[in-house]
Image: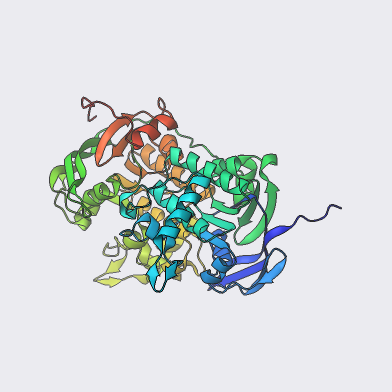
Amino acid sequence: MEKTPEYVIEMLHITKEFPGIKANDDITLQLRKGEIHALLGENGAGKSTLMSVLFGLYQPEQGEIRKNGQPVKIESPNDATALHIGMVHQHFQLVDVFTVLDNIILGAEDTKMGFLQKKNARAKVKALSEQYGLLVDLDAKVEDITVGMQQRTEILKMLYRDNEILIFDEPTAVLTPQEIEELMQIMKNLAAEGKSILFISHKLNEIMEVSDRVTVLRKGKYVGTIDTAGTTKEELSRMMVGRPVQLVVDKAPAQPKEAVLTVEGLTVPSKVHKNDAVKNVSFTAHAGEIVCIAGIDGNGQTEFVQALTGLEKASAGKITLCGHDITHQSIRARSQTGMSHIPEDRHKHGLVLDFTLEQNMVLQRYYEPRFQNHGFIRFDAVRSYAEDLIEQYDVRSGQGPVTIARSMSGGNQQKAIVAREIDRDLPLIVAVQPTRGLDVGAIEYIHSQLVAQRDAGKAVLLVSLELDEVMNLSDRILVMYEGEIVGELDPKKTTVEELGLYMAGAKRQGKERETA
């Protein structure tokens, strides 16, 4: 029998519980020195919880962590840093108004008699950035650099603290294809230099490309660890979901009918700078088609959707929905005219986190006769409606309809919002990042629901950063760059690379583009 290889980190029999749910149920994960080890699982499988235990954000009820064979106690992120464990979180932990250099040294400052010694820090960061191919402008403010550059800043932050074990939590969620390629290369360089990487992802392509081994979790339990070279995407998705999954959207060609949404010359001011965030945008979405607005985060999509749904005011332009001018209507009026909205920020605009799941399911409908009688809410009707949606959309929660929304995993919060909005059965669905943070099983289900809505004669306006989703789901693609529509593409005739060039602003169609 071969001798067990030396592991740099071992998480043995980890159990972590939250009310009504075991997030981690006796999980063992072993990381070799110099390897890229992927952690794969559905939403709520316990991946982020497990990494948060390793980083000291949570304390497990059972189990132990060893580093180089020795048991260690990690009671806070400071303990993790002392053990040379670093983490790039899904939502970057950067101070927008500080420079890149200040963000990197924040919390690990080199001082002499109370004065900051930036010269040494700058030299160290410069050397690291050259060594690992992480070129970034150290004097730029974080708010002025791209998301990809912000991610490099986070990686440099870990390297500056001499971290040997690097945790990446969903690192590619907001990157362009070119930036994803660069990140993969950076991860390979780090591993080649002897760093050990734990990489949380749902994206099977990336796991196949970059990892040496994969550990799969399902519903909080350990399924197995396999060598990436000896497996396939289909096998991984089956381990992750427990059944075969369709990785490509199955849909017939679109049959567009009458116009449902017409946007003419929409301009929206920016809250951050003097320029407009959205500049003179015009297009039409028809019944029976999925129109996608693609673009890198921060190119005006957020402001556009807020003006469309009534969260922000437009400074110019006109929005027509089902023949009604809704440019200056309230959110409820837009909703009643025929617009449902899966928002980008599920916590700010999608859910009331301290309400129960059933209360969240009827947020826009509690006043309908079905749910109230002479001004009193019919709680039995609300409960049975919520139970139906929970079952239909497989929304997993510790206590069913009475679960507090805040306690659910992000993916299940997302499923609840999608269930509520699709079930309202309105002519227009504005779906912003509908599958952000979801696993392949849930993505497959939500994509099929959106296609079913399209086939039932709804107009679907999809706003997405996920290139696979854009290419797979849409019938027409509008690319938004710096607040303008710079191209209209047919997903059947374009490539991911061409789409990436439009998104990065390297390519644009002429002014003569039809606003079809």
- Residue 232 vertical placement versus 425 (above, below): above
Residue name at image x 14 percent, y 43 percent: 318
Asked whether 122 or 297 is in front, the reply is: 122
Residue 189 in picture, x, y percent from top left = 57, 44
Colour style of the rendered protein structure: rainbow
| Residue 490 location (% of width, % of height) | 36, 28
- Is 200 situated left or right of 410 in this image? right
Regarding residue 295, the answer to whether it shows in the image is: yes
Give the residue displayed 65% in from the left and 43% down from the top: 235
- Residue sitting nearer the eye, 215 or 248: 215
- Name the image quarter holding residue 14: bottom right
Q: Nearer the viewer, residue 423 or 152?
A: 152
Q: Is residue 146 left or right of residue 128?
A: left
Q: Give x and y (percent) for residue 513.
A: 24, 26
* Residue occupying image coordinates x 45% and y 63%: 387
Q: In the displayed structure, would residue 44 be above or below residue 484?
A: below
How many callouts does the rendering have?
Answer: 0
Task: Report the quarter where the C terminus lies.
Answer: top left
Name which residue lies at 40% across and 53% down.
418
Q: From where the camera sits, is residue 256 visible?
A: no
Depicted 85 relative to depicted 469: above or below:
below
